[in-house]
């Protein structure tokens, strides 16, 4: 077989390109793990200035900044972290055993604190027995008794409201200026005994509620709730994140987390109404979806991050099996070395001279 120098050089160049390019080949947009190192089960994610905070089942708080996780120096009695109001060292933290970093002079608040919200009237805490309002140096219980799961402030044309999602009692609502008064049931149109796990507002301040039986929206506080899309009926909607203007044709994209994984639906607002602008769409294939429900979704540095026991980031990934491309490149380089024609061996000629008689020889 006649070997060609040109072929060998070509194989070498292709091999070098493949060997270098392997790790950089795109594998599409997927969910990929981004856990704090050795953190265990993550119970909460919260966006803060310059990064993300993650609370854990073991009572740890981790901070993601510049792509690196670091553990906060704070001790919470190894109690699961349920709620973080702001910077961990300076603001209250809700845990499964009570409130830590309470405001100066505040009485102790024991038991599970699942949500926190600062209002003009004082600090609101959601507990299994109802809302607690820290005002004038004491905890008040405005009622009614309910297992509070989530809290949200809504600003809009109908005034400012505060809403509480509950386990088993739908939504409770209160005008923002009077959270110390009994909160009113706000569940007309929701399934009976609904668990409300997540609350969100649209750019026009329409209210969204993620329940154990689907996703609903409400024009203003006290109006009947309406289902958003039949494709979401019966699903547990554990978390939501609204990306304004990120949908098709300038619509808003609503990211939804639940037992089914991460999905999205584009929504459009017009004249105080909300309508789906498409079908619910799974964000990733089944092999990339988390094995348990998604309880938190937020945005960080242009990428979605979510918590489902572990932390995940939704963004560009490496091509699966990229290393085979690099290995192929190395094989081509070795093949090129074998294929390169070897130079012909040098021929060295020896010439002999006739003997010259020495001076001592006879003539």
Image (cartoon, rainbow, N blue to C red):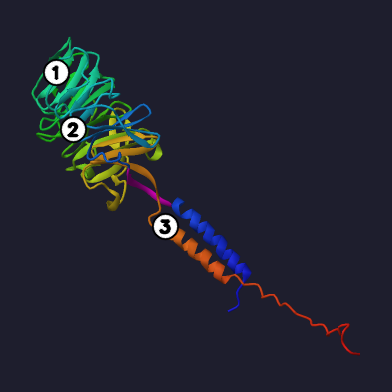
Mark 1 = which residue?
108
Q: Is residue 87 visible?
A: yes
Quadrant that contains the C terminus: bottom right
Residue 23: which numbered mark, if any? none
For label 3, count other residues whose C-alpha is less than 10 Å away and answer few (under 14), some (14-19) or many (20+). Answer: some
Residue that label 2 marks: 80
Magenta-drawn stretch, dominant element (helix, strand or loop): strand
Residue 298, horizontal then vertical, whole percent: 31, 34
Q: From which residue to which does the magenta span run?
A: 26-33
The location of residue 45, given as percent across then percent down, is 27, 33
Q: Nearer the viewer, residue 333 or 84?
A: 333
Residue bearing mark 3 = 323
**In the rendering, at what x and y percent does residue 254 appear?**
30, 37
The secondary element bearing badge 1 is classed as loop
Helix, strand or loop at label 3? It is: helix
Residue 284 magenta: no
Q: Is residue 251 above or below residue 49?
A: below
């Amino acid at each position: 077989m006649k070997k060609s120098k040109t072929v060998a050089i070509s194989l070498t160049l292709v091999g070098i390109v493949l060997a270098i390019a392997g790790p950089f080949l795109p594998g599409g947009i997927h969910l990929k793990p981004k856990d704090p190192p050795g953190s265990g089960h993550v119970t909460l994610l919260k966006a803060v200035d310059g990064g993300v905070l993650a609370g854990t089942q073991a009572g740890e708080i981790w901070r993601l900044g510049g792509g690196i996780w670091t553990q906060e120096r704070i001790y919470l009695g190894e109690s699961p972290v349920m709620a973080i109001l702001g910077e961990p060292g300076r603001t209250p933290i809700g845990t499964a055993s009570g409130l830590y970093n309470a405001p100066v002079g505040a009485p102790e608040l024991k038991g599970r604190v699942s949500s926190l919200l600062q209002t003009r009237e004082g600090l609101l805490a959601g507990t299994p027995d109802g809302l607690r309002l820290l005002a004038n140096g004491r905890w008040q219980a405005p009622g009614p008794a309910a297992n509070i799961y989530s809290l949200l402030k809504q600003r809009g044309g109908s005034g400012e409201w505060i809403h509480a999602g509950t386990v088993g009692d739908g939504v409770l609502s209160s005008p923002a200026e009077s959270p110390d008064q009994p909160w009113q049931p706000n569940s007309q149109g929701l399934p009976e005994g609904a668990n409300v796990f997540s609350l969100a507002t649209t750019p026009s301040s329409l209210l969204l509620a993620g329940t154990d039986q689907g996703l609903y929206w409400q024009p203003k506080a006290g109006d009947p709730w309406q289902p958003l899309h039949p494709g979401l009926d019966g699903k547990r909607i554990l978390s939501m994140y609204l990306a304004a203007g990120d949908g098709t044709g300038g619509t808003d994209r609503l990211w939804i987390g639940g037992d089914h994984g991460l999905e999205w639906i584009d929504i459009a607002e017009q004249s105080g109404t909300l309508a789906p602008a498409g079908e619910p769409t799974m964000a990733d294939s089944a092999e990339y979806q988390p094995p348990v429900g998604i309880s938190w979704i937020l945005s960080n540095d242009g990428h979605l991050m979510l918590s489902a026991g572990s932390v995940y980031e939704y963004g560009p990934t490496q091509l699966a099996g990229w290393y085979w491309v690099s290995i192929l490149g190395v094989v081509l380089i070795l093949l090129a070395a074998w294929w390169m024609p070897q130079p012909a061996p040098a021929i060295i000629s020896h010439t002999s001279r006739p003997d010259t008689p020495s001076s001592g020889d006879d003539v």
